[in-house]
Amino acid sequence: MMIDAIQNFDKQLPLLVQEHVRCDFLDPIMMMASHANDYGIICIATCFVLVAVKKTRQGGIMAATSLSFEVVACNLLLKNIIQRPRPYLVMEDLQILVAHETSYSFPSGHTASSFAVAYALTHAFGRRGALAYLPAATISASRLYVGVHYPSDIICGAVLGTVAAAVACKLLTKIPLKFLRKK
């Protein structure tokens, strides 16, 4: 019964968004947000910048490690084990706003990577780092908006990214290397 409710929600929400939320003003914004983290580019760039600056290096290493853990769990393992087709391949009435994607739908890699980095930055920098949840949430919502993910893909991607980052950050705080210590 719970599975049926989740599947019903997964099929109804994208259509509700398509019919009642999409508009000429939001469409280009959400399309841009949807592509902002293609191939993890925003997350990777963030990690490189943070690692390059001595003052933020610890946070950058945490973010990069969190991102690495997430990529293995999401893109290498779960997507290939579960092999869930994209919603637009299953739902005839759903119109997507971006090009077809070749990877599987579950979980959302864009969401998982965004949340992994946001968690790591919050862990490393507190409230300032928590600002990373704003683009993470926007990127995640955009994936549903443009029609390439089910809601459960987004929710599970956020959970997966958070868990991967929590594990990575916990492990890194136990490593007694000089460059990982807070000053």
Image (spheres, helix red, strand yellow):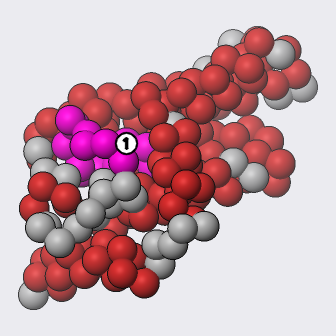
Quarter of image, res 76: top left
The residue at 75%/23% (across/down) is: 50
The residue at 77%/12% (across/down) is: 52
Quadrant including the N terminus: bottom left
Q: Secondary structure at mark 1?
A: helix
- Does the rendering let one see residue 112? no
Relative image position of residue 13 (x, y in whole percent): 32, 78
Quadrant including the C terminus: top right
Task: Please state which of residues 36 and 178 is positioned toward the viewer in this rendering.
Answer: 36
Task: Please state which of residues 121 and 45 is positioned toward the viewer in this rendering.
Answer: 45
Give neighbour class at mark 1: few <14, some 14-19, many 20+ (Cα, 10 Å).
Answer: many
Q: Read off the residue under disc 1.
A: 109
Vertical relation: 123 (above or below) 57: below
Quarter of image, res 8: bottom left
Vertical relation: 34 (above or below) 102: below
Find the magenta span and give its range. Answer: 98-112
Side of 118 relative to 74 (left or right): right
Q: Amino acid at mark 1?
A: Gly
Relative image position of residue 113 (x, y in whole percent): 47, 40
Magenta segment includes 4: no
Task: Please state which of residues 87 and 164 is positioned toward the viewer in this rendering.
Answer: 87
Relative image position of residue 140 (x, y in whole percent): 48, 56
Vertical relation: 152 (above or below) 84: below
Side of 165 relative to 5 (left or right): right
